[in-house]
Image: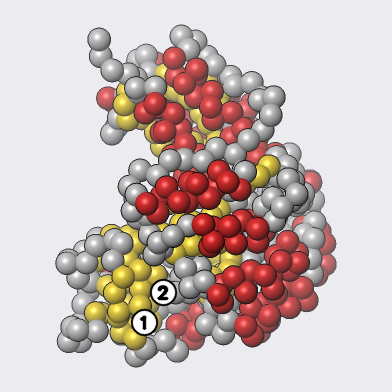
């Protein structure tokens, strides 16, 4: 009897990657092999994203491409945020596709083995699924799902719901097991990491202290995205953790979304620009070399020219190390989709102007590091080179075929671009190297 094979494709954020790894674990336990291509698989599992309009278009195009295989007897399972937030769209594209949501990952085997269409039912109790470590240098774990916000533009709330946090002991055990089996970088991720545990009576700080106290070994921890209003109440404790335990990357991902208070109100964000700046200044005061990333949405309905100038001014003032710029696109079932929209041409010109400002500021930050000797943790092969991370999570590209992920090496920073640094081992003589094949992907505009 031939072993059943499943093929998986994943779109979207780190949380979706974690969900895919969880599903792969369920498949392995059930004796279902992973196929390398759709053609050799019995079941096609597409883990979808729906955060932006262009993502929907890309996934819909892919589902249409897979219809030919579906008609030849392949079973198709659509999972992820598109399946949860827009099931009618999935049904329109592929009427007989099975559906699994982020809340129902443990029903994947039932869906795979069902002789007909399977639509996962909502569980009696929501839980967070934690993937097993399978030997990678980077181990990513979602410690919670959902959030406490209700932003006017966000469809992810519809897909992932209100906050539900994983048990602290379960998270610590997963981190401990991953470190024992070779993980060197632990990424704690969530829709808003700073609210972890508030649904169960504990906090992110409680978790970080428990990891620091109970997990032995040499590894790095990267904290995921935290909203300014959620981070502010625990910021002092988080900074103290980073100061006392060098295993925490000195890195913060704090989305601001706009530099204008009126736009933030329309977005239904729960903070103002002053709070964002207060958080940033406090971080920079205690950890001057900390790296700060942020996100900005350009062209939200109601964003005036003056409001956009405020965003430009904020970038000039705060000088973040990394900025992801996204043009607003209306999402179904969200309040902002009903508002008067800004023309695409205006969004385009504003995003281009903002990206130029971002490149100017981030390059200035990176140029200050040229000539410095730093230790980096090598985490990812890329073309002929390898990407390492400084203690503040800045990426450094090194060309050396002898190096491998998991190594920690000293390098001197040779060159700087706006989104990455280039370095060489301190024992090597300086030389001109073609870095282009191994550079990190540039943020979209």
Residue 25 in sight here: yes
Task: Kindly state the secondary structure of the residue where label 1 is placed.
Answer: strand
Q: In the rendered image of this protein, does residue 336 appear above or below residue 425? A: above
Residue found 23% across the figure and 71% down from its top: 399
Residue 304 in sight here: no
Residue found 41% across the figure and 33% down from its top: 24
Task: Kindly state the secondary structure of the residue where label 2 is placed.
Answer: loop
Nearer to the camera, 76 or 5 = 5
For label 2, the residue is: 390
For label 1, the residue is: 374
Q: Is the Cβ of the residue at disc 1 closer than 8 Å to that at disc 2?
A: yes
Instruction: Name the spot of residue 395 as percent of width and height, x first.
Output: 40, 71
Residue found 38% across the figure and 59% down from its top: 184
Cα separation between marks 1 and 2: 7 Å
Instruction: Name the spot of residue 152 as percent of width and height, x first.
Output: 76, 51
Q: Which of the 4 image quadrants contains residue 306? A: bottom right
Instruction: Name the spot of residue 252 as percent of width and height, x first.
Output: 58, 69
Nearer to the camera, 412 or 436 = 412
């Amino acid at each position: 009897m031939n072993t059943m094979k499943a093929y998986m494709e994943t779109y979207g954020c780190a949380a979706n990657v974690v969900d895919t790894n969880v599903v792969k674990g369920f498949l392995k336990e059930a004796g279902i092999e992973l196929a390398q291509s759709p053609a050799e698989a019995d079941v096609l599992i597409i883990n979808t994203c729906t955060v932006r309009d262009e993502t929907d278009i890309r996934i819909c195009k892919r589902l249409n491409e897979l219809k030919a295989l579906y008609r030849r007897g392949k079973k198709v399972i659509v999972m992820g945020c598109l399946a949860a937030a827009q099931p009618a769209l999935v049904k329109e594209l592929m009427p007989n596709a099975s559906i699994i949501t982020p809340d129902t990952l443990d029903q994947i085997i039932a869906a795979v083995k069902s002789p007909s269409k399977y639509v996962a039912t909502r569980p009696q109790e929501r839980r967070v699924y934690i993937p097993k470590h399978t030997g990678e240098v980077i181990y990513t774990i979602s410690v919670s799902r959902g959030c406490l916000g209700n932003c006017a533009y966000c469809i992810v709330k519809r897909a992932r719901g209100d906050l539900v946090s994983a048990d602290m002991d379960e998270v610590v055990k997963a981190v401990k097991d991953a470190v024992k089996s070779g993980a060197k970088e632990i990424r704690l991720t969530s829709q808003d990491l700073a609210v972890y545990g508030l649904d169960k009576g504990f906090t992110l700080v409680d978790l970080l202290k428990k990891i620091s106290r109970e997990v032995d070994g040499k590894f790095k921890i990267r904290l995921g995205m935290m909203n300014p209003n959620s981070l502010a109440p625990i910021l002092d404790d988080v900074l103290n953790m980073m100061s006392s335990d060098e295993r925490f990357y000195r890195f913060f991902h704090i989305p601001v979304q706009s530099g204008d208070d009126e736009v933030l109100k329309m977005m239904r964000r729960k903070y103002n620009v002053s709070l964002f700046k207060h958080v940033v200044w406090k971080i920079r005061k205690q950890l001057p070399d900390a790296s700060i990333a942020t996100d900005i949405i350009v062209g939200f309905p109601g964003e005036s020219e003056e409001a956009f100038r405020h965003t430009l001014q904020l970038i000039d003032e705060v000088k973040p190390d990394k900025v992801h710029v996204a043009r607003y696109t209306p999402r179904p079932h969200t309040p902002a989709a009903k508002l008067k929209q800004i023309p695409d041409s205006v969004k385009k010109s504003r995003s281009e102007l903002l990206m130029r400002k971002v490149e100017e500021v981030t390059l200035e930050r990176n140029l200050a590091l040229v000539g410095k000797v730093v230790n980096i943790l090598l985490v990812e092969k890329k073309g002929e080179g390898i990407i390492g991370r400084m203690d503040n999570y800045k990426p450094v590209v090194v060309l050396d075929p002898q190096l491998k992920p998991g190594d920690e090496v000293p390098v001197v920073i040779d060159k700087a671009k706006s989104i990455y640094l280039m370095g060489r081992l301190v024992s090597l003589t300086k030389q001109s190297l073609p870095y282009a094949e191994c550079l990190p992907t540039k943020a979209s505009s």
